[in-house]
Amino acid sequence: MLATPAFADEPQLPDFTELVDTAAPAVVNISTTRDVDRTMTSSRQFGGQEVPEIFRHFFGDRFPTPPGGSPDHGGEPRRSLGSGFIFDEDGYIMTNAHVVKDADKILVRLNDRRQLEAELVGADEKTDVAVLKVEADNLPTLNLGESTDLKVGQWVAAIGSPFGFDHSVTSGIISAINRTLPQDVYVPFIQTDVAINPGNSGGPLFNLDGEVVGINSQIITRSGGYMGLSFAIPIDVAMDVAKQLREDGYVSRGWLGVSIQPVSKDLAESFGMEQAKGALIAELEPSGPAADSGLQAGDVILEVNGQEVDHSTTLPRLVGETAPGDVVELSVLSDGQNETITVEVGEWPNAGPHQSDGDPLRLGIAVQPLNDMEKRRLGIDHGVRIARVDPTGRAAAAGIRPGDVLVSIGQQPIESPGQLKTMLTNLPDDQTLPVLLNREGRAYFVAIRFGNDD
């Protein structure tokens, strides 16, 4: 009598074939181009493909060349590749904000090889979510799941375009949930061991029921390729952002107006705490929502509406999820005593862009005010942040990008969006002026010719 192999009764590995057959038609390839001047070309380009901002932290200068890539030449359009998926039959597509950042043209390639130009509905860099819109009929869509139901150890799969190879499928398990990354405090990431590489960004992460539970966004690597750690944005977070982008064009977040730092073991001991946890208030914004609440520098915030602040990075997410105008109840350690303090949450100052692209001189930008903490971080005492750039406007022609801070025009300091619009309106026609920008903490001049003619 033959013995039964020991592995016969062991559980079988999951079969993803049905999932792929059903879901693949709604997964898309996204390519973008951005025209750049030779002087504006970044050194962080490889094979004609720009390294997305969010990957620079992880990839350094070892971004691989996609198939068919060619050396970069200043003045030629920059190209980037990513993935996305159709989540609404009216042509709405979800992807990462870094995939479409600064794009002048966005092309979406469908599973049936149709190529459509997409409109950017909105992008939120804090969560790395963007929504696109294409004009087409009878588009396939994906079913959305619940990321709050995920458990460590369960199987998941990804479909995307790593290195430009469309509809590549990889699988693995969830290795952690609610993971906070140092520069992305607004997202409780899903950590997986699914193989994710450049080009997978923006693609869907599926559970075994074929439902989207996340959007693949980042990896951590020392080599430039996948090393077993990949991170996805939970679909619940992404859909909340998408809803606001579709309805309002921007994302509104709660704001306390406090500068915080982690509680180290030594600080915890000095405060008489049994363990290091919470968010230590280092500074309060004088005009912020918390200024008159009773909070003070040196307080440690331990809970927000009963939810524990286990680390300082947890606080921005919990407050950011709160609607501006709502009242939150904070559990605080102050002068060695536990207190409960209520604060009416304000709106993050950079939420809604203040449009100035309708001015008669057609500079073609939308700007946001800077708060005091941002000014201190950048080492400036005035300026406005550029939220959007019209690709046909004067600012785009001069190389100005979203995220730049407009400091002065013709040596006149810019104090606010309203003051900028007044200044532009009153500038004489037909003259070229120096424009001072602050780009990631560095001063940068460009010249713009102002006038009413097009």
Image (cartoon, helix red, strand yellow):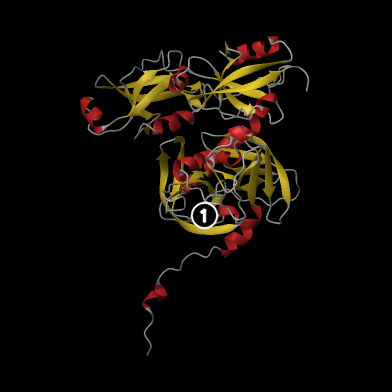
Residue 385: quadrant of the picture: top right
In the image, 157 versus 100, the foreground residue is: 100
Q: Quadrant of the N terminus?
A: bottom left
Task: Please say if 166 is above or below 417.
Answer: below
Give the image location of residue 245, x and y in percent. 62, 33
Q: Amino acid at mark 1?
A: Asn
Q: Which residue reaches farthest right?
A: 453
Give the image location of residue 142, x and y in percent. 62, 51
Q: Which residue reaches farthest bottom?
A: 1
Residue 173: quadrant of the picture: bottom left
In the image, 11 versus 125, the foreground residue is: 125
- Left or right, residue 337 beside residue 390: left
* Residue holding disc 1: 207
The tally of labels here is 1
Judge the density around disc 1: few (<14), some (14-19), many (≥20) Cα neighbours within 10 Å: many
Task: Please say if 129 is above or below 349.
Answer: below
Q: From where the camera sits, is residue 99 visible?
A: yes
